[in-house]
Image: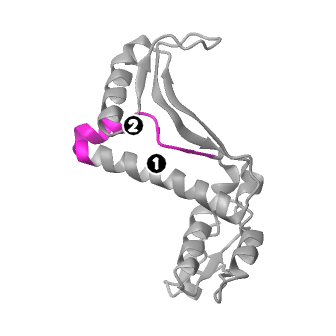
Amino acid sequence: MAVIGAGVAGLSTAYELVRAGRSVAVLEAGRVAAGVTGHTTAKLSVQHTLIYDKLRRTRDAEAARLYARSQTEAIEHAAALVDELGIDCDWETRDSYTYVRDAGRVDELRAEAAAAREAGLPASFVTETGLPFPVAGRCGSPGRRSSIRASTCWPWPRTWRRAAAGSSRTPRSTASTRASRAGWPRGPVRR
């Protein structure tokens, strides 16, 4: 199998495929973890702006519940990998909040907190935050965000070597500058 892109998403996918016994080649046109991953805020969160109310309105309550579950399970899975592989990355579980300064958006936050609670998260809405600057409101969930030191939490080449020591399969990484090497139409891979 080929995984295109050696950022955290591509390398995590490759790692899981290797764990499942697949042979994997990772194709990267530039440097490992230098694109989106290299410029990340290094947080995993179940609270992504005002997603739950939007999902509930545009899809249904079940879609919001499934989204909350998938985000929660993803954070739990990442935490388990950090423990399993002994990755020293200053993993911290923190509270996850979204704020608004504009009083005209308070109803949006109230709806978001209600939709997130309906989706199974321990969400709340408050107007008093203790922040050193004024806000009109805050919604969010305690203990639903994890912060990491990204420079060391995803040391994938080193992690792969350690993890692969007990495996018969090891992901391979190779630079690719032309899409045709992966079987797609000829032309340069955008960097």
Amino acid type at mark 1: Thr
**Looking at the image, which is closer to me, 81 or 114?**
81
Residue placed at 72% from the left, 51% from the top? 150
Image location (x, y in percent) of residue 147: 65, 42
Q: Is residue 115 placed above or below 33 in the rendered structure?
A: above
Residue placed at 58% from the left, 80% from the top? 18
Using the rendered view, name the quadrant where residue 102 is placed: top left
The type of colouring in the image is: one colour
Q: Can you identify the residue that label 2 sits on?
A: 121
171 vs 4, left or right, is right
Q: Which residues are magenta?
A: 43-62
**How far apart are the two marked residues, 1 and 2, measured between alpha carbons?**
9 Å
* Residue 72 numbered tag: 1
Q: Is residue 85 magenta?
A: no
134 vs 65, left or right, is right
Circle 2 residues within 10 Å: few <14, some 14–19, many ≥20: many
Which element carries disc 1, helix, strand or loop? helix
* Residue 57 numbered tag: none
**Looking at the image, which is closer to me, 35 or 53?**
53
Image location (x, y in percent) of residue 58: 24, 42
- Across the whole image, how many numbered discs are drawn on residues? 2
